[in-house]
Amino acid sequence: MTSRPPAEIGMPLVEVDTPALLVDLEALERNLRRLGDRARELGVRIRPHAKTHKSPTIARKQIALGAVGVCCQKVSEAEALVTGGIGDVLVSNEVVGRQKLERLAALGREARIGVCVDEPENVAAVGAAARAYGVVLDVLVEINVGANRCGVEPGEPALALAERVAGTSGLRLRGLQAYHGSAQHLRGYEERRAAIAAAALKAERTATLLKSRGLACEVVAGAGTGTYAFEAATGVYNELQAGSYVFMDADYAKNLAADGAPVREFEHALFVYATVMSKPNSERAVLDAGLKAVSVDSGMPRLVGREDAEFVRASDEHGVLRLKESNRPLAVGQKLRLIPGHCDPTVNLYDWYVGYRGERVEAISPIARGPGN
Amino acid sequence: MTSRPPAEIGMPLVEVDTPALLVDLEALERNLRRLGDRARELGVRIRPHAKTHKSPTIARKQIALGAVGVCCQKVSEAEALVTGGIGDVLVSNEVVGRQKLERLAALGREARIGVCVDEPENVAAVGAAARAYGVVLDVLVEINVGANRCGVEPGEPALALAERVAGTSGLRLRGLQAYHGSAQHLRGYEERRAAIAAAALKAERTATLLKSRGLACEVVAGAGTGTYAFEAATGVYNELQAGSYVFMDADYAKNLAADGAPVREFEHALFVYATVMSKPNSERAVLDAGLKAVSVDSGMPRLVGREDAEFVRASDEHGVLRLKESNRPLAVGQKLRLIPGHCDPTVNLYDWYVGYRGERVEAISPIARGPGN
């Protein structure tokens, strides 16, 4: 069930109850502008990934700064975005199952809706749903460019599927989904560049093949926060799907730039606010934020502004800090900000963003969280 | 925001939309009865931990089978339990912060409420809140019996804190919280037994000390699903807080019994229901359940009834299966059940339990999930 908001607008930040999911609004706004500006410089369209933020409020800001629409990963997110006023949403994923397909097609009456496919029976099912609701859905054929997750193989298998799409009433073939997920977190600049160069080659070969058969391939979509400049530079990708750039997380901050230093293009804008709830001795303190308040799949969160303490383990409702020698006090009741290891599944734990500017709460905004379907 | 229920009562199980959190009601009922029976045999009270299930519906069943009340880990859970008709709730944790203490004390007007403390300023704050609402709160002094998380040290430090509690108006000193969290998942029977024997010695020494000073120590509380029989056998612990036994998870199922075989006392009753959404080749399939549908902090989920497939990695919305050679088909659209690695944080991702009996949905029940405060 939806939990109560942990704050009120106008409240000093330090009064916010914990755990809470904080957004530094100025850092968010700078991140949003930065990607918008970069996309213009690079000459590519952006369709930011809303699976990170699950918020129509943020999606509207992205579109105001030049995005052509947003993408998301499932029907429940698309519903929340369309309800929140977004007119162009791509589900950058396969949608399987009767109920989900009905809901996807019904959304097509409210907004421009796209979806990915990677096998023929699903093409038929998506088409049937579209016809049942009298809509036309945009379709991208997802190809496996190296992530080895979903997606048909590039080249002939992708061509065969694209022909199916083109021949299915209710569907509008738009091009290729060619996202290389596992390249996003390769640490070295050159590693990421090489992975995307290989992916782009597969995408280009497939796009050329489709066009040679007279099939539409206006869109070659993909890219994430870790690699988007590489995709843009290939000249093959023309619609980029970076998502995590809005918030950044501790894991993305480990990626290295060309000079070997950590990438610092975007700022941390998302924090878990936590209270010291126990401090048994000088070497240990415990926060009220554990596995139910911060995702640890990509490592433990980092503390903001405390080099004298390290978040070393999480249990359901506790985060244990190892304290180093320090002359800075850390007392029960004190509140700290954490940078999540992985922003997307952390956001998914919360019902509310608490947006702040300076030291004052300025926005409380709902999150379309949930296991979704 | 609360997501829509993925099922309707009366629906065949196979129609349930995915991802969904399934409860095998017959397995749940057997688990509930089994712990109730065991507690009677062992001559101890049980106060099961509701942080696992976050459900007043299940808590009521636990009390009907002999539990003296339930415990939980935070105020938001206590509120949901009291609202759902539970009259005796212990927050087996420290509660820190103005808003949380006000809410805890206000709950004391509706039900018998207990809480743990581990430092003097918090004792004063809990007492002040209780007096402000004209209630008396039960208090356990939490001692560190080996988990090295919260808790004052046993012996003299615990005595000093207990004296504070006894001297604070609005508080009723009840005894000790002596939970050994990290012992729960020690794999070997003898390791777990030895860890609890050591914990019990500390608890006993402290209880004796309190009583020798004329302080109340009626309750020595602790224990979890992995060790409760050991605590019961010590004769020191008299109120056991096992929680995961209701559902069991893949991690608990790795604990070994005295004969070296995996413990099989309780059954898996909780499953994530997922759909095969992509099957790119004969070696790989992809489920629509990833990090936002199943917690992986204690390892990947296990598949039910499919030895020919292994859940090998999770991304936000995908679970990748490695397929072995098999003559059993696995097709896009097929639904599978997963046993979560860790039940508590998995439950926390969902708004609804879908309870089923045989192959029919029989109950849809809300979960008091959330980062809580």
Image (cartoon, coloured by chain):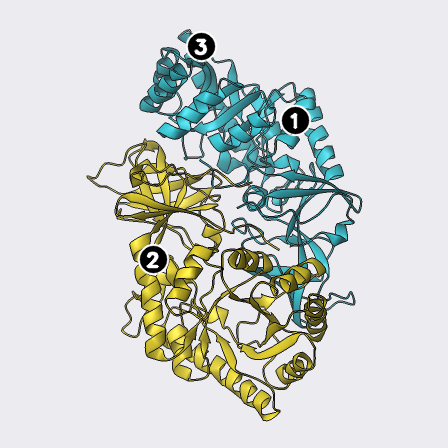
Chain colours: A yellow, B cyan
Q: Do labels 1 and 3 share a chain?
A: yes
Displayed quadrant of residue A141: bottom right
Q: What numbered label is drawn on residue B60?
A: 1
Depicted B139 relative to depicted A206: above or below: above
Question: Type of residue at label 2?
Answer: Leu
Tell which residue pokes out farthest to the left in this image.
A327
Disc 1 to disc 2, how far (Cα)? 45 Å
Q: Mark 2 points at which residue?
A: A28
Question: From the viewer's perspective, is residue B8 above or below residue B32?
Answer: below
Which of labels 2 and 3 is toward the front? 2
Coordinates of residue B177 in the picture (x, y in percent): 47, 24
Q: How many marks?
A: 3
State which mark lies toward you, 1 or 3.
1
Crowding near the residue tagged with mark 1, few <14, some 14–19, many ≥20 C-alpha atoms within 10 Å: some
Q: Which chain hosts label 2?
A: A
Q: Which mark is residue A231?
A: none
Real-space Cα distance between discs 2 and 3?
57 Å
Disc 3 target residue: B211
Would you call the spot at circle 2 few (<14 residues within 10 Å), some (14-19), or many (20 or more)? many
Q: Between residues B235 and A299, which one lies in front from this camera angle?
A: A299
Q: Which residue is drawn at 69% across and 36% down?
A: B265
Nearest the eye: A306 or A12: A12
Figure quadrant of residue A264: bottom left
Label 3 amino acid? Lys
> Can residue A303 be seen in this snapshot?
yes
